[in-house]
Amino acid sequence: MKRSLIIIGLTIVIIIPTLFYLLKLNQSNTIHPPDAIQKVYNIEIPSSTFNFNISYDINNLADYLNKKITGIFLVKELLIQQKKKEKIRVTLTKTDNIVIIAKGQKLVCIFPVIVDAELTDSRFGKLLTGLVKPVHTSIIITLSTPVTIDKQWCIVTHFKIVNHIWAVKPVLQIGPFKINMEERLNKAIKENSLTLTSLLDSEIYKAATLKPSLVPIWHDLQEPILISSIPNNLWIKFICSDISGKIKTHPSRITCMTAMHAKMFIITDTTAASKTNFHSNLLPELKALKEKDVVDKSDIYIYAFTSFREINQQLNSFVKGKTFSAKGHSVTIKKIYAYASTKGLSVIIITDNNDYFILSGNLMYDAATQTLKTKNFDFEFNPKHRLLNAGVDLYHNRIKDSIETKLVVKFNALIQKAPNLIHNAIEKEKSGKVIDLNLNNVQIKKCIIIMDREKIHLIVNIGMDANLKLKKIQTGKIIRITDRVNTNKHHVYMIGR
């Protein structure tokens, strides 16, 4: 009897601690899923800056002036002496081309003119008038101006005559007598320089305007861009807010460095969006661009997102029911569930025998390959009791690699699509007879990843070089300027002065 009790007692002493140990061992190997993120974020998308270098070829501007100002373009009557009655009619004719060049930050205009002068009135009557031999000579007038742009998008110049050189001195011959007219004509040129400079300023102002070039870009950039039709249509839309510019001259061109500011929104109804805060803005007045803000590359932010509901639908369609085998062990995926956790992106995998494994890692953007990757994406297990997870250890790499690839495939598609969205939105139908637009070096600079309870948000930062060139200027009618004379006061008035 005593022996039986002793055996029973020893058995209890051995079994109970063993059971307790195995229970603790099992508990220590129980994997607890990382806590889920409960917050839902309202994503604030940074404002984008589209930088354009809009250029005018200086030769094209000269061609425009040569077509606009040609032949006899100015006729003016001058008094030879203020107190006398002698009056001459001066005719300016342009037969050779105007040349415009850039020197530093100024434009220099070389204006060759043929000068004809004839006596039209004299105190000695018509007899003396008929004896006077007309003057025929030429002069090269050099003008210079700084270049700016006003708020109405027009190039502004303020030409001033720098100097002039007579090819042949202007001499008026009356019978045997010769009168050197250089001093008088030099004075007339100085006093009436505003006529010529105003002519150049007004014609350049009318011709060199950026507005027709920018309006289609401004308008099209604000058109909704369809980015997804599954499960419902989804658009991105830029709302342009303001635009600023600064003029610089180069040896062969005038360039307006333009910065256009816009913000991107996600919309689900384009009709409703046009009636709400998402309506497109009209091109505003131009603001002055500060020197410190002059940069070549655009800084654009594109927002994209995908829900965990959609991610889990796709993951299950890819791997649900798939069997993984290695070294005589196999497991079939019954269900898979991804979510945002305190450890980053976590995935719970439930197998056919109702076991579950957990994968966790961090989404990151790899600038070298311009793709999303999962960093430290691996299974959760207790290394002290790896033997209990031997089945997992045999094929977990295959499961991990398969899921990791499927996780980022959609994100990478979104990222790679972003540059083309910008390219197509801006360049669409912009290369034509008048405008030539080139977008170069469109590339992703960085990708910001934000996860919350419902979604994974991506803010893609894109850099781009944009150059827009005005190829042709409409000439219009040729200019002719003549005098309108008030004979009572003996003053000469110029039309358009």
Image (spheres, helix red, strand yellow):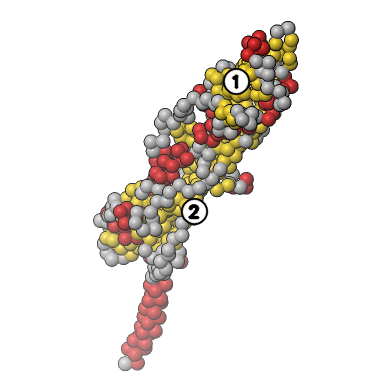
- Residue at point 57%, 23% (across, down): 74
**Residue identified by numbered label 1:** 92
> Of residues 89 and 51, which is closer to you in this image?
89
Q: Is residue 312 left or right of residue 169?
A: left
Q: Pick the quarter of the image with the N terminus.
A: bottom left
Q: Is residue 357 visible?
A: no
The amino acid type, in three-letter code, at marker 2 is Ser
Image quadrant where residue 317 sits? bottom left
Considering only vertical position in the picture, is 200 above or below 246? Answer: above
Disc 2, SS: loop
Distance from Cα at disc 2 to Cα at disc 1: 55 Å
Residue 47: assigned label:
2
Of the numbered discs 2 and 1, the one sitting upstream in the chain is: 2
- Residue at point 51%, 43% (across, down): 152
Q: Residue furthest bottom?
A: 1
- Residue at point 58%, 19% (across, down): 93
Q: Where is residue 255 shown, x and y percent of the image?
A: 56, 36
Image quadrant where residue 396 sits? bottom left
Considering only vertical position in the picture, is 337 above or below 8? Answer: above
Q: Is residue 7 left or right of residue 189?
A: left
Q: Where is residue 225 shown, x and y percent of the image?
A: 36, 47
Label 2 packing within 10 angstroms: few (<14), some (14-19), many (20+):
some
The amino acid type, in three-letter code, at marker 1 is Leu
Disc 1, SS: strand
> Of residues 362 and 301, which is closer to you in this image?
301
